[in-house]
Structure formats: structure tokens, C-alpha cells
Amino acid sequence: MTDSTIIKLTAAEIAGKIASGELTAVEVTEAHLARIDAVDEKVHAFLHVDREGALAQARAVDEKRAKGEKLGPLAGVPLALKDIFTTLGVPTTVGSKILEGWIPPYDATLVKRLKAADVVILGKTNMDEFAMGSSTENSAYGPTGNPWDLTRIPGGSGGGSSAALASYEAPLAIGTDTGGSIRQPAAVTGTVGVKPTYGAVSRYGMVAFSSSLDQGGPCARTVLDAALLHEAIAGHDPLDSTSIDAPVPPVVEAARNGSVAGMRVGVVKQFRGEGYQAGVVQRFDESVELLKSLGAEIVELDCPTFDLALSAYYLIAPSECSSNLARFDAMRYGLRVGDDGTKSAEEVTALTREAGFGDEVKRRVILGTYALSSGYYDAYYGSAQKVRTLITREFEQAFEQVDVIVSPTTPTTAFPIGERADDPMAMYLADLCTIPTNLAGNAAMSLPCGLAPEDGLPVGLQIIAPAMKDDRLYKVGAAVEAAFVEKWGHPLLEEAPSL
């Protein structure tokens, strides 16, 4: 098979061909490394390509097969890893200058599980600094382009991972989702992204932004591929105090047996209206009609506290970020500025943070510190947590009426790079539909549901399920995906412009 054919295969197809001997893991890895060499200068999906490490992992898979050892469902499949997970011997920067060149001495639990599954890690992908952003423009190392239109954003904070998928630089990727940073990039690049139930995937070794919201998860080009990756990385981890000690839901089985027949699907009134692009609403309405035609019962839901989610999130997340980022003090690791023997520790810390943190990180640290300060804690942070409780209860009430909830993933398609750079509020609105799920800890998926007629760019359909019912995402997502493929005769992403 040619390289151009190999890179268009799904992860499941690649694993099958490696297991049968039709392809070697080294051939697959070399094909994707060649693709990175060919297009990543334009896309800028990767911050670091671990060429030697990837080929070594691929050779180990081929050696296992030659010995007759059993290979896992994703053995030999290449993956792009968001640069927020510590990776032994490989630079981990979190998109920030303050950790430029830092090489961790250990693997995150998620990375250990990928390696145990014989997944080949190609390298680390670009991201908004410390995962703070919705466009990957806040990376200290420059923005990533959307393969559908390189002048537009690939979403954020995990834009590097989504762009790697959409440009065929990798068939699988890992992202993290604090307020939508897996789902929003998936929506604007025509890929699949899943935020598992909070606590379902270990956060040990994932650099913290907002600890009660952060969640790692799978990114792929198909629902089945996402399910296979989900199964590989999920599960209880005693090293993570927030990890759920419960069996992983049967996500792969659900993805292989997609159906919505007899399911009750909720549509929330608050997830549409002013600020929503006409083409996004049109494709969403068509998706609802498609679900109805597949046998689902559509139920209208009114969830008024969802309108408060954005405000609550932008108090809770910055508050937690101001606490988490206090560790970057120039004393223990990372950048150190001004240590010439004449300055105090406080002065060195201040100079280091001034040089090492970008504007968005500083904005959120200041906002969070203010919200937690004496006299304002109850008025701001405390009130936001009360709203969070109300949103969680409203989800619980909604799931008494429906099996899943659907909505647009984002109010608009990918916007031009730079368009919202000087307007933080406009940027924050990109996560309008995704944030409520993070506040409640539920599971959610974004998958493609067509192209917006006014600009020809991808639109995402969001599916939300109750906590620890992640398999429902895959059951519904697989049914919708199959219906789209049958309708158009090919995967949606095939329409993406070639690079």
C-alpha cells in the first residue's frame, strides 16, 4: 500500500492490517511521519515529533507479532498526544514558554496506558497555553491552522490534536476538555471528540488547569476509533484521587451496534438563539430530524440555569487556575529569569512569570485571584459553585426524561485566525454549548453533522449523556455517523481540502 492510502485508513483498519501482516507497524509509522514532514510546516499541529521514539515503539509491535504474541485492538496505530501530558524523555511544554524545553522524568498514567496498548506516540501537539483558550492562538509557539482553511482556527485548546487528525497526520489523538477543548476543536475540523465522564480517565501526569473540570479524552476520525481509544485509556487509577473506581462502560460494543430506536433524545431550548450561525442551526435541525427518522423520540427541554453556565465557569476555572499555576515560581523547574544574585526570590518569581506566561494565562490568573480574595470569595466563587450545583441538578432532572441530550457543539463554524484575539468575551462564547457538561461532570461527544452552507465549513453535533453512561454517546454517535455515510456515500472528512 502507498503512504497516501495508509494515512486515509481508520485506526481500526490499520490495527487489523498490522495484526494480519498486511502492513507492518513500521510502515504505518513511516507513512505518517512522511505526512507530517510534507504538511505540518503549513498546519503546525505538532510542537515536537518524536521520530526515533515512534519508530522504536513500532518495531516493538512488529517484533511482538513476529513472536506470535497477542496484539491489542490498537497495536501499532499512530497517535498525536496533546502537549499537556507528562511523557518520559519527551518535551512537555503545555504550550507555554515557562516550560520550554522541560523533559519530564515520568509518564502520565494515560501515557502509560497508551504504551501498554502498543499505541505508537508520534509526538506532542500544539495547544493554547495551559489549555486556556478556544482557538490555539494562545500557544507561545504560534497558532495552528485548520486543514479545511489554514487561515481559520482549528479550535482550542486542543487545536493541534484536531488538526493532526483532519490533515491525516495521525489517525488518533488525545485531547483534554475543561470547558469544551476536545469537542469544540472536533466540531470545527469535522472530526470526532469525546469528553468522558469526569474521573473516568486519569488526570495523573496531566498538567492541571482547573482540577474539578479538566478531563482527558479520545479524538479520532470515526466513532469506532474514538471508542477503541476510550477503552484503552479509561479506568480507575489509584494515583488520581478523583478517579472513579468503576468498570469502563461498554463503549466499543456500543460503537459497533449503533442505534437510536426507542431512545428519548432531548433538545434544550437554551442551546440556540442569538449568536448562533444560521448554517449551524440548519444542520442541527436536520440532525434532529435524522434522529427522528432513525426511531428516536424527540423531547423539548427547558433548562434555564444553562444560561448562567458561562459566567459560573469563568469564575470557577480561573480561580482553580490561579491556585494550580502558583507552582510555577522559578524555584523548582522550568524557566528562571533575573536570577543574577542581586534579586530576591519574590522578584525572580515575578520576572519569570512576566516572561513565561502569556496574556490569556495572566488574565485568568488575575481574575481567579480576585474571585478568591477576601471579601469577594462568597460573592463570586461561592456563588458560581451554587450555580454549578443548580446546573447539575437540572441535568439530573433532564435525564429523568431523556436518554441523551443533543445540541450544536459550537454556535459558529471556525472563525478566522486573529478575528477574536482582542475580544476575550467573543472568544469565550465559542464554548457556550460545551461548558454546562463540564460543570456537571457528564459525558459528551462531538461528531460531524454536515457543512454550513454559507462557508462550507464543518458543523458539529454534540451528544450529552449522564455520568458513567458514556456508552450511550457511542450508541447514538455510531447511528448518526452511519446514516451520514449512507446518505453521502463517503466519510464527511473526505471533503476536506487537500494540503
Image (tube, helix red, strand yellow):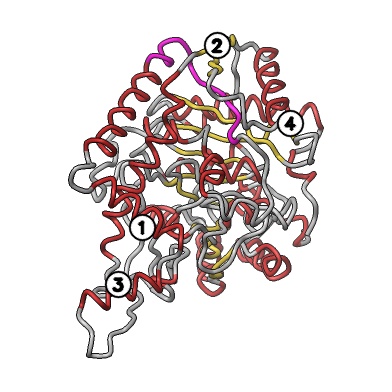
Q: Amino acid at mark 2?
A: Glu
Q: Earlier in the sequence, mark 1 or mark 2?
A: 1
Q: Does residue 281 lie above or below 199 as drawn?
A: above
Total number of numbered labels? 4
Q: Earlier in the sequence, mark 4 or mark 1?
A: 1
401 in the magenta segment: yes
Viewer-side residue, 290 vs 344: 344
Q: Amino acid at mark 3?
A: Ala
Q: Earlier in the sequence, mark 2 or mark 3?
A: 2
- Please report contact status of discs 1 and 2: CB closer than 8 Å, yes or no: no
Toward the bottom, the furthest residue is: 341
Q: Does residue 393 lie above or below 11 as drawn?
A: above
Q: Amino acid at mark 4?
A: Gly
* Number of residues whose C-alpha sits closer than 10 Å to that of mark 3, classed few (under 14), some (14–19) or many (20 or more): some
Q: Which numbered circle lies on residue 279?
A: 4
- In terms of secondary structure, where does tag 2 sit? strand
* Number of residues whose C-alpha sits closer than 10 Å to that of mark 2, classed few (under 14), some (14–19) or many (20 or more): some
Q: Nearer the observer, disc 4 or disc 1?
A: 4
**What residue lies at 37% left-to-right and 71% top-to-bottom?**
354
Q: Earlier in the sequence, mark 2 or mark 4?
A: 4
From the image, tell me which residue sits under label 3: 350
Toward the left, the furthest residue is: 374
What distance separates the C-alpha of mark 2 from that of mark 4? Answer: 21 Å
What distance separates the C-alpha of mark 1 from that of mark 3? Answer: 21 Å
Q: Earlier in the sequence, mark 1 or mark 3?
A: 1
What distance separates the C-alpha of mark 2 from that of mark 3? Answer: 52 Å
From the image, tell me which residue sits under label 1: 207
